[in-house]
Image (cartoon, grey):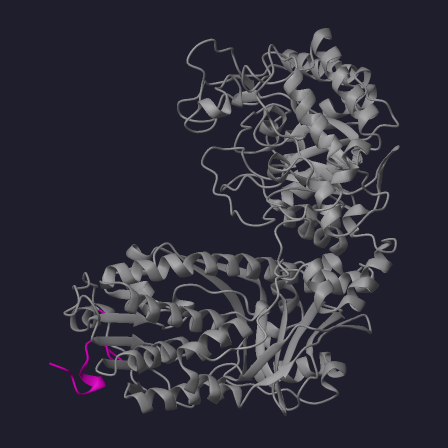
Amino acid sequence: MKPTSGAAYPGARGTARPATTNPHPPAHPNHPHRIAIIGGGPGGLYAAALLKRRRPDREITLWERNAPDDTFGFGVVLSDETLGGIEHADPAVYEALRQHFTRWDDIDIVHRNTRHTSGGHGFAALGRQQLLEILHARCRELGVELRFRTEAPYPAWLAETYDLVIAADGVHSTTREAYAQEFRPRLTTHRCRYLWLAADFAFDAFRFEIAETAHGVMQLHGYPYSADSSTVIVEMREEVWRAAGFDETDVAASVDRCAKIFTDALGGRPLRANKSAWTTFRTVVNDRWSHGNVVLLGDAAHTAHFSIGSGTKLAVEDALALAACLEERPTLPEALAAYEEERRPVVASTQRAARASLEWFENLPLYLDQPPRQFAFNLLTRSRRVTHDNLRLRDPHFTAAVEREFGCPTATPPMFTPFRLRGLTLRNRVVVSPMDMYSATDGVPGDFHLVHLGARALGGAGLVMSEMVCVSAEGRITPGCAGLYTDRQTEAWRRITAFVHSQAPGTALGIQLGHSGRKGSTKLMWEAVYGAEPLEQGNWPLVAASPIPYRPDSQTPHELTHTQLAAICEQFTAAARRAAHADFDLLELHCAHGYLLSGFLSPLTNHRTDAYGGPLAARLRFPLEVFDAVRQVWPQERPMTVRISATDWADGGTTAEDAVEIARAFVAHGADAIDVSTGQVVADEQPEYGRSYQTPFADRVRHETGAPVIAVGAISSWDDVNSLILAGRTDLCALARPHLYDPNWTLHAAAEQGYEGPGVVWPMPYRAGGRRPRTGRTDAPKPRLALGS
């Protein structure tokens, strides 16, 4: 029996929520007939309209605790992609929206009294209140029951009473809280405070303005949403907010102060609030989006920072996907599973972009001294959604100006500009990252290594790195690891360097020296079910900073004595002398990924109580001793780099702040660049994978230490390389898997960009392949006449 009064519902306003129960199966398992929607924001309203339009006989009730004309915020930005989906699903809603859109193409970036404008971006916005009114009208027209000023019943009652419950109740979702054990939400609070305001005039572009105040850096995000109104968001780090006294100021006074701080951007006009309050953004992630017949939508399921304008967009796209899956799948469980399967990767990608964007603004002070146009380019590409190539298509004049300011010669992509490290000049910014091949015999590199490294040297990269070359037999990871502790190994490496220098002149060859530590004596990679599996026989004893096994089933290493530390240091210096004799151009000390030197740096793997354990400065002691010893015997004109893990991706491990101090220490001892990787230190790490996911750590190290850096980690395209280099987030980009897929990756990147300058040289025997091969014809005559029968 359908209840008639909101106040009679269990869980109505003023009634405590009881413990939740398991949702019941819907009465109509194939196509839910009675649908409850909690939350009257754009996502909930649009879901109601779509579901009712598709099946007019459905009974759909929506609860919204606020009045119809209550809304938070001001303007809403929607992408062309989202609008296309709306137009296809409900032309009536699209047409109503279209009549209210304000469109613009430009982004203005104002910093230190200089404005740079980039065009071709294509935005569409309208007032949030207008959007809600359009959706209210559409829902009423279709027969959706809208219950405003009414608290929704508690979710368990709705789940027992309705076939489907859609929780669109926002970032503070009580539904998500009620079923927290099932949805398993994770909420991350970030470091900036922001205030959502409006101005009674229209900006002529999306505007970012930076204010450097006595209290710290503040920023304005502004965009028009009607002919006479703009959204204005003022944001700053928490410590800046407190130092400026905003924590002791009411909203009205805050609004007045913000208008004065950004008076130039506003033309002296005032700002106004609408239920505004200083807020800290929270990222919401849920392990599951549905439980029984209850499903999360929009901010209840996920949030993405406002700086990429995604909240309403994601909610509307959720509604589109949910409505489609309910039609396409035969049962409700299958539909809800398909909805999550479809949307989760899209949302995860958006959240990664949003996280990159919000962290860029959190770390804004790092970039203030960049050249003006590079600063603007850095801001525009901060989320990695906009790239160098994409921006060149949108606004070629702006991008060309950034390239000129950076120092790119005419018609030269950033990746093909040279870079100098000590006495070595790299002809381009591409590095073939160290990749263990596990193909040596008794540590001796053979024909495989000659072909592997030789092919990638011929492939055009500026620097080709060896795999981790072990400084002793006991320091190998596996029986197949290469070494540099015998004369035979030295001569084998010298054969490889001679080939590279004679057949790929201009390509530098680097060696990475390391010791496996507690991660040694394991099977070859392709012989193990999971990584770092112990050998079944033929094991050798392991040593490490502390006697902690890598995995529970791993061999427990012996804690190194001071005498053994001195012996290992001598092994590194002996290997460095051999590397110099083998004619390597660059030496990298491997202090990452949980191997021996990395094991000293991480508090998770170094539990020593002597001078080599405890605070970071003490944990750095042995790696620095090794570095100093190697630097002393390595030729002074040849550069040395250090690879570090900038985070352990585990609680209590190395942090990004630690990484900066580690990098600063190595630079002070003479490191020419820091190769910034992450993780692989502990087996239970929780990495946050994604495109270019490690580059923010390199970016931070570069800007806080002033040292050159090498960025690594899922950099997969030449467009990524150009973007990272031109934005000033890194100096060199190291790529691994792309070079396994294509040894000629750099040559092909040049061909695809039409570049033929000195930054990359095709080997003479390969020059005929310098253009992409032709494929089948695509220029067949097009039909011109339609002939009648």
Residue 670, above or below 443: below
Residue 659, above or below 67: above
Residue 68 falls left or right of residue 484: left
Residue 551 spot, x, y in % from top left: 43, 27
Q: Is residue 14 magenta?
A: yes
Q: Quadrant of residue 135?
A: bottom left
Residue 274 in view here: yes
Q: How many marks?
A: 0
Residue 617 spot, x, y in % from top left: 67, 34
Q: Residue at x 82, y 47 (%)?
A: 756
Q: Quadrant of residue 184?
A: bottom left
Residue pushed farthest front? 789
Q: Is residue 166 magenta?
A: no
Residue pushed farthest left? 1
Residue 144 spot, x, y in % from top left: 28, 85
Residue 370 spot, x, y in % from top left: 80, 59
- The residue nearer to you, when weighing 7 against 249, is 7
Question: Which span is picked out in magenta?
Answer: 1-17
Q: Residue at x 42, y 79 (%)?
A: 42
- The residue nearer to you, when weighing 611 against 449, is 449
Residue 191, above or below 697: below
Q: Quadrant of residue 629?
A: top right
Residue 140 falls left or right of residue 467: left
Quadrant position of the C terminus in the picture? bottom left
Residue 179 in view here: no
Q: Residue at x 31, y 58 (%)?
A: 337
Secondary structure of the magenta portion, mostly?
Answer: loop
